[in-house]
Amino acid sequence: MPSSNIVPTVTLNSGAEIPQLGFGVFRVDADEARRVVTDALEVGYRHIDTAAVYGNEQQVGEAIAASGVPRDELFITTKLWNDRQQSAEAAFDESLERLGLDYVDLYLIHWPAPKRDTYVEAWRSLEKIAESGRARSIGVSNFEREHLQRLFDETSIVPAVDQIELHPAFQQRDVTSFAREHGINIEAWGPLGQGKYNLLELPEVTSAAEAHGKTAAQVVIRWHLQSGNIIFPKSTHRERMAENFDVFDFELSRAELDAITALERGGRVASSPADVN
Ligand code: NAD
């Protein structure tokens, strides 16, 4: 099995180290998830991002158990679904049970779901879970400035991460700079734009790919890594998993990075936090 120690780690505000490149399993069906995660671990990934709502925690756990990879070499994230914000400790126990683990590395509130107005209560439950040691770090996802500000004002622990939609067409500069000022790391979901726009065909990306003898996806992944984002691109195809992992033998120049950064156009490809409840 290839070593994964080529992946740089980022130190979270909890003191934990997270591999900056991992593997996500959104929209990986339960009947395929065990094979997909087994492939990802064989390719070398050691950081897996799942969620209760993905419906594949059990299969992710089975793949981990069967892999033989020591638990302390893995970084496992799962997330609290919106309808459990008022029963977060029970929901967390259920996730751990499905994963077959006695702790996760990172537990996130999946969405602020502001119409419910229960995310502050949920965060207090996550603080208790963190204090118990069963989540080594806790964080949030899809939180905007105002949601983060409420946690700062009303609770004690600063989230370790904010996991948000972020790719070249939609860089969320306001929330990323606000979060980083407060010591919160940014996890970029949909790092390849979920394949929903022509990101991998844009000349700013393809010219860099040509110059380095790499693929367009590898260039976009490098742009994220060199921008300080934590990412976990998804593919169910083993060759693409390997391609997305093979990004540590080249570096984009300042000009190449800047050209991709200039692709910002407010191009959200998925749901807005205000609308998800
Ligand atoms: P992504 O940007 O990783 O896109 C995945 C798609 O990109 C694939 O389905 C495939 O079509 C394409 N792709 C992957 N590798 C490729 C390659 N090498 N060449 C060409 N095309 C390639 O989108 P994602 O899966 O939505 O995001 C990654 C992870 O982020 C998810 O799996 C999940 O873990 C997490 N996520 C979190 C939230 C949240 O609300 N917190 C929402 C969505 C995703």
Image: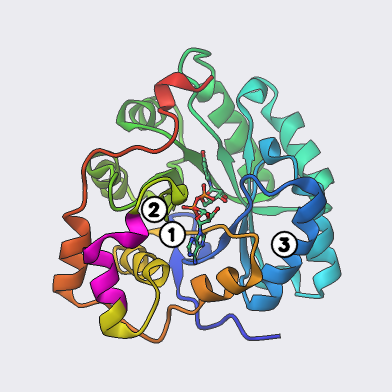
Q: Is residue 147 left or right of residue 227?
A: right
The span shown in magenta is 199-209
Was residue 208 drawn as part of the magenta stretch in this picture?
A: yes
Q: Amino acid at mark 3?
A: Val
Tell me where residue 156 appears, x and y as whole percent. Answer: 46, 35
The label shown at residue 36 is: 3
Disc 2 residue crowd, few under 14, some 14–19, many 20+, Cα 10 Å: many
Can the viewer see residue 189?
no
> Which type of secondary structure does the marked residue at label 3 adopt?
helix
What mark, if any, has residue 204 been given in the picture?
none
Residue at 58% x, 37% y is 127
Q: Are marks 1 and 2 in contact (CB under 8 Å)?
A: yes
Locate residue 210: give its quadrant.
bottom left
Q: Is residue 63 left or right of residue 75?
A: right
Q: Secondary structure at mark 2?
A: strand
- Badge 1 amino acid: Ile
Measured Cα–Cα span from mark 1 to mark 2: 8 Å
